Image (spheres, rainbow, N blue to C red):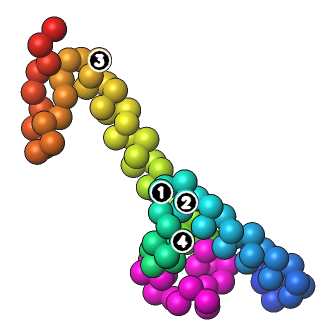
Amino acid sequence: MIDDSIVPRDSQRSRRIRLRAAVLRIGALLGWEPHDVIAFAEALTNCPWRRCGCDEFETVLEEYLALGRVIGEKARRRTAHRRNGVVPNGEGAVRAVAT
């Protein structure tokens, strides 16, 4: 890992700007408004948005990846259930689909 103390200040600033933009952009892809993204980041990192640095924004991006994995897995399970003629009933149980 690169020691942040040896990275020029402008490089750190531009990296922070890029990470912040990515956090906002991916949050928007999730259907979140900027204020929702900011609230999520602040709650996750326990840091005010204006004070979030690269570490905090990377934490948010890692959490987005975790959310994406969960969403993808749920979608795969639903597809498999439908192929097998079983669908969740919304309460944790499943029911057979008449064919």
Compute the Cα span from label 4 to label 3. 38 Å
Residue contact between numbered discs 4 and 1, judged by CB atoms under 8 Å: no
Foreground: disc 4 or disc 3: 4
Q: What residue type is labelled 3?
A: Arg
The image shows residue 26 at horizontal and vertical percentages of: 58, 59
> Reading the chain from its start, which is encountered first: label 4 or label 2?
2
Residue 87 location, quadrant: top left
Place of residue 23 in the rendered image (x, y in percent of width and height, measured from the top left): 60, 67
Which is nearer the N-term, disc 3 or disc 2? Answer: 2
Asked whether the viewer can see residue 62, the reply is: no
Percent position of residue 72, x then y? 43, 41
Label 2 sits on what residue type?
Ala
> Dot 3 lies on which element?
helix
91 relative to 99, above or below:
below
Q: Is residue 29 above or below residue 19?
A: above
Q: Please report whichever mark, 1 or 3, sits nearer to the chain's N-terminal start.
A: 1
User: Where does the magenta region start and end?
Assistant: 41-57
Left/right of residue 13 with respect to residue 23 in the rendered view: right
Q: Say which residue label 2 marks.
A: 28
Q: Which of 30 and 58 is in front in this view?
A: 30
Residue type at mark 4: give it. Answer: Pro
Secondary structure at badge 4 equals helix
Q: Name the residue under label 3.
A: 83
Kindly identify which numbered label has been placed on residue 31: 1
Secondary structure state at the residue bearing disc 2: helix
Question: In this view of the protein, can residue 36 be seen by the observer?
Answer: yes
| Left or right of 70 on screen, residue 19 | right
Residue at 55 percent of width and 60 percent of height? 28
Q: Pointer 4 and pointer 2: residues touching (CB < 8 Å)?
A: yes
Q: Looking at the rendered structure, which numbered label has been put on residue 34?
A: 4
